[in-house]
Amino acid sequence: MDIKKLFLDNPWKSRAYLERNGIKVGYAKIKLTPTRLADGSHRHNGDVAIYDTSGAWADADFHFDISRGLPKLRLKWVESRGDTTICGESVRSAKHPFGGRKILKGAPGRRPTQMWYARRGIITPEMEYVAARENLAALNGVSGKCSSNAPRNSLCMQHDGRALGWRGAKAEMTPEFVMGELASGRAIIPANINHLELEPAIIGRNFLTKINTNIGNSSMASSIDEELEKMLWAVKWGSDTLMDLSTGSDISETREWILRNCPVPVGTVPLYQALEKVGGVAEDLSWEIYRDVLIEQAQQGVDYFTIHAGVLRKFIPAAARRMAGIASRGGSIMAKWCMAHNRENFLYEHWDDICDICSAYDVAFSIGDGLRPGAIADANDSAQFGELEVQGQLCRRAWDFDVQVMCEGPGHVPMHMVSENMRRQFEWCSEAPFYTLGPLVTDIAAGYDHITAAIGGAIIAWGGTSMLCYVTPKEHLGLPERDDVREGVVTFKLAAHAADLAKGVEGAQYRDNAMSLARAEFRWRDQINLSLDPERAEAFRMKNDAEFTRDNASMHHCTMCGPKFCSMRASMEIKEAFGGENLGGCSAMEELNDE
Amino acid sequence: MDIKKLFLDNPWKSRAYLERNGIKVGYAKIKLTPTRLADGSHRHNGDVAIYDTSGAWADADFHFDISRGLPKLRLKWVESRGDTTICGESVRSAKHPFGGRKILKGAPGRRPTQMWYARRGIITPEMEYVAARENLAALNGVSGKCSSNAPRNSLCMQHDGRALGWRGAKAEMTPEFVMGELASGRAIIPANINHLELEPAIIGRNFLTKINTNIGNSSMASSIDEELEKMLWAVKWGSDTLMDLSTGSDISETREWILRNCPVPVGTVPLYQALEKVGGVAEDLSWEIYRDVLIEQAQQGVDYFTIHAGVLRKFIPAAARRMAGIASRGGSIMAKWCMAHNRENFLYEHWDDICDICSAYDVAFSIGDGLRPGAIADANDSAQFGELEVQGQLCRRAWDFDVQVMCEGPGHVPMHMVSENMRRQFEWCSEAPFYTLGPLVTDIAAGYDHITAAIGGAIIAWGGTSMLCYVTPKEHLGLPERDDVREGVVTFKLAAHAADLAKGVEGAQYRDNAMSLARAEFRWRDQINLSLDPERAEAFRMKNDAEFTRDNASMHHCTMCGPKFCSMRASMEIKEAFGGENLGGCSAMEELNDE
C-alpha cells in the first residue's frame, strides 16, 4: 500500500491550513485552471476550499509511516485543561508497535467531556476547530455572498411548525454557536481524550451532514492490513467517522493500529469484543465482562460506543413475529441473552455505570437501534418505535452525566414512512443527533443497496438526520472490500451533500457552482477535480476520448454528443451573442448566488 | 452477442403468459426454493410473478434471430379496427434486411390513437394488455390480500388537497380504469400502429412507475451492433421504454434494426436526424426538412417523439444568463435557430401540423424540456418554468387532435425544489404524465450521477412522476456503453420501485416480502433470483464465500458476520423459541401483509 500515492496523486488538490486563536485547522484546496476568453486571453479562477477528512495523510510534509501514527494534535489541548490524570500506559504488542502511550482519565470528580465544558460556557479548541472547518463560505471568502439556493416551497420535514432540517434563520457559524449546540445536546464532538490524533468534527443537524464508514473483519475474512487500508480509503474519500466492527481475531490490535492512524472519530460496538471473549455464546455474556471491554476500549481512545441498551425484554415478542426478525447483530445478541436469562437487558440495567465510565474519557454514545427493521414489511413497527422511546430515556439520563449522545435509527423503511422516524426521534430523543443506516427504501436491490440506502439517506438527512452510516454494494451479500468502501463512501458523500443543499447550508453550493461553471466553460480538468471522485471521473472521461489527456483538457466537445450536438458549445455561442462575454470565475459565481 | 444466453441464463426465471379475452399477456415468473423446516421437512414456496419487459426474447421457444425481428403481436389488433390504410412498403437496405413491411396510416378522417378510442369508450387489446400486466397482485394470486404497507404520515406531494402520487382510494386495475385514464390524458400507451412488435405499456401516475433508457451513437462513437446490444440489455434489465438518440451515421438503419426487435415503446428526438440532414448547421433547419423526418420516423414505427416546441424566443435571454446555459441538445439547437432567424421556434408555429401527422400513426408526444436546468444554480428559474407553462398549452392543443402526450421535466434540481416541479407540471399540464431526467440533486458527483439522479428520481416519482429517464455513471463524461446501460437501468428500476412502494401501489411490495422472507430463512438462491440484478448478486455472494455454490445455497451464515454474529441465525432461534415454527411461504407473506 503506497499511502503517499494514495493521498497525493492529484497535483491540483492540496492540504491547507488556517489559524484561529493559535489553532491550525486543516482543509483542502482545489486549484482551478484559467478560463479561456473569446479574445484568447485568460481569466484566473480562484481555488475552491472544501472540507477535508484526510488529516495529515494529505499533507505532503508528513512522514507517511503507519507505525509512527498521526501527530497528537490534541495533546496540548487536553493537558492544558488540567482535569485529567494518567491512569496507565499502553503496552507494545507483537502485533502493534504502539507502546508507552500515556492513558488519560478524568481526574476524580471531573468529567472531561465536550458537553461538560459547553454547559459551563467554556469554548474548547475542539469547538474552535469545528467552527472553522464547518464554515465553507468563510473558507472560500464568500461569507454572506454565497448563500445557497434558498429553500422555497420546501418539503422539509416539520414538527410543531419547526423545520427539523436546519436552523432556519441563519445563526453564524461561530465557536459560541457550536458551544450552544453541544450544551443543548443537539450536537456532539466525539473526541475521546485518548484519541489525541483526531481532527475534531461535529455531528448535529445544524452542521454539515456527516457520513460514517463501517469496516472490520469477521471470523472468516480479512486481516489487520486490509482493515487499515480500508480506513485510509475511507478518510481519503471523505468519511467523517469510522466504525471498526471487527468480530474476528486480533480485535484489540486492529483497533490500536486504526486509532493511532485515524484522523476522524472512531466508533465501535463493544458487545462484539465481549462476545468474542465468551467464545461467541451470547448466553455467557455478563456485565463484568462487558465493563472490562468498555474500559479497555475507552482507554485505547475509541470516540463513540454503540450500545444496545434499548432492546428491552418486552419488545422481543413483537420482533420475533416480524418478517425479518432482528436484523441488528447487537440487537439479536441481547435478545438471546434476555431470553436465556429471563432477565432485563444488562446494558439497560447498568446504564448509570456505563455513563460513569464514558464520562471519564469523553466517549460519546451512539445509542443502538437493535430492533431496526430488516425488511420493508417491518418498518416503523411497535418493536422499533418502542426501542426508540427507550433510546430517548437513555439519552436524557446520559446527559445527566454530561455524556454526549447520538441515537441510531432506520434500516429498511419505504420512503413514505421515513419522515415518521425523524419526527419521533426528534421528539422522543429531545433533539439529540440522529444517526441512521440508510434507510434502505426497498428490499429487492441486492448488489445495489448502496443506492437504495443513499435514496433514503438523502431524504432523512434533509429532514434533519445528522449522520448517515454508509452502505456498500456488498450489503446483504458479503464483507465489503477496499473498492466497496470507496463506492459506499462516495455514494454517501453525494447523498449527504444533496441534503446540505436542500437544507440550505451556507456555502455548500459553492462547489456545485464551481463545477457547473467549469462545465459551461469546458474546463474538463476542473470538472474532474471538483468531482467527489476525481479518479473515476478522469478514468471515465479518458476511456471515452482517447485523445483526452491532461494537456488537452479544454476541448470543446466530447464523444457524448460530438461537436455538432454539444449543448454547452451552443450555449457558449448563445451567451456570446447576448453581448456578455462568457460568465467566469468566482465573482460570477457570487453574483449568481446573490440573486 | 449470444442473445439466447443473455435472456435465458437463469433457470429459475422464466417467461409466462396469461390469457385475457383471447389476448396473451407476457410476464415473468421466479421459481423459489423450498423452506427447510426445523424438523427437516420442506415447505413449498410459490412462484413470484413480476412485470417483464423482455418480450419474446425471454421465451425459450423464440427464434432469437435479430434479422427476422419480433413477432407482430399487434398486427391483428390494428387491422381489426379497420381505421387504417396501407400507405407504402418498407424497403430493404444494404444495412438492414427489413423490406416488404406494409406501412400503415390512419384512414382519411380517422385518428387511430389510443386516446381517440378511449374517449369513445372503446377498450382496445392494448388497454386489456396493460391492465393485465400492471396487476401484480392478481398475477400473484393475492388480490385484496397483499396490499402494501399502507401510506401513513406520508410526505406524498399534495396539490389542493389531492395527493399527486397515487389514485388514493383504490380503483381496481381493470381495462375500464385504463380507458378512463387514457381518455382524461392522465396516462398514455405509446404504440405506433407501425410498431406491431410492441408489448403495450402504460405511462401514468396511477400505474407502475416506468423508466426509460437512452441509447444512440454519436458522430464519434458506436455502431449499429453496439446500439442493438444496448437495446437488448436495456429490456433484459427491465427498461420500460427506449429512446434512440443517435446523432451519427446510419440513423435510419439503426432505428430500423431497433424497432423490429424492440418489445418496448421506442422514442426519438426527430430534430437530431433533421440536423444531420443539414450537415449539423442549426441555422439551416426548416419546417419542411423536419416534417419529412417526422413522417419517415412515424412510418418506421417510432412510438413517441420528443419535440422541443416550448423553447420560445422570449425565454432565451434568461437561459443565456444562467450558470450552465441550455443543457438540452434540442433546446440549444432551437435557441440557435430562433436567434439566427429572429423568428419564433418553427416547432411551436407548426404545432397543429405536427399534431396532424402524429395523430395519423398514433405517435405520442413527449413534449421536450429544452430549457431544463443544467446546474443546481439554474433550477426552477423563469426560463424553465416559462417553458413548462407552454408545454401545458401544447399538451392541451395536442389533445384536440387525440394525440397522447407526456411532458418532459427536470435536470439538475436540489431536493427541496423538486416538489415545485411536480406541482406546477400537474397544474399547468392538466395532469398529463410527467417524464423526468433525474432530477440530479447535486452537480459534484461526476462518475456517480446515476445515483445523484436516482435520488431525485425516486422523490419525484413518489410525488407523481410517471416515468424516469435513466442516467448512467457516464453522464457528463462520455457515451454510455453496454455495462453503463445495465448500471443505469437497474439503478432506476430500484428508484421506480421505491416510489411504487411509497405510493402504495397494490402488489408492489409482494416481491420485497418474498425477498425478506428468503433472507430470514437463508434461502440464498431465492435472494439472488428475487434481486433486480441476480447476476451481480450472485457474483458478489460467490466472491465472498468460495464455498458458496448453487448446490449449497442454504448455508446459515456468510462471511459478513460469520456464524456467531449472524443476526438472522439468532432471529431464527428466537422465533423458534416463541413456539411458532419459522414463518414461511406465501401464506405467511399474505398474513403479514394483511396486518
Image: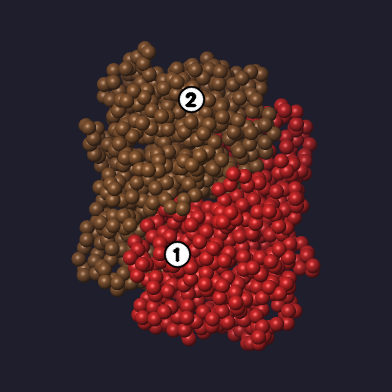
Chain colours: A brown, B red
Find residue B79 and report its image quarter: bottom right
What residue sits right under mark 2 in the picture?
A396
Chain letter of mark 2 equals A
Q: Amino acid at mark 1?
A: Phe
Tell me if residue A463 comes above or below residue B441 in the rendering: above
- The residue sitting at 28% across, 25% down in the picture is A77
Other residues around mark 2 within 10 Å, as few (<14) / some (14–19) / many (≥20): some
Chain letter of mark 1 equals B
Task: Tell me the SS state at disc 1.
Answer: helix
Q: Quadrant of the N terminus of chain B?
A: bottom right
What residue sits right under mark 1 in the picture?
B385
Task: Tell me the SS state at disc 2.
Answer: helix
Q: Quadrant of the C terminus of chain B?
A: top right
Q: Is residue A431 visible?
A: yes
B247 vs A403, nearest the viewer? A403
Q: Is residue A11 visible?
A: no
Spot occupied by residue B214 in the image (x, y as percentages of width and height): 51, 65
Spot occupied by residue B378 in the image (x, y as percentages of width and height): 38, 60
Tags 1 and 2 touching, CB below 8 Å: no
Q: Amino acid at mark 2?
A: Arg
Tell me if residue A14 comes above or below residue A359 in the rendering: below
Spot occupied by residue B330 in the image (x, y as percentages of width and height): 44, 72
Find residue B515 and report its image quarter: top right
Other residues around mark 1 within 10 Å, as few (<14) / some (14–19) / many (≥20): many
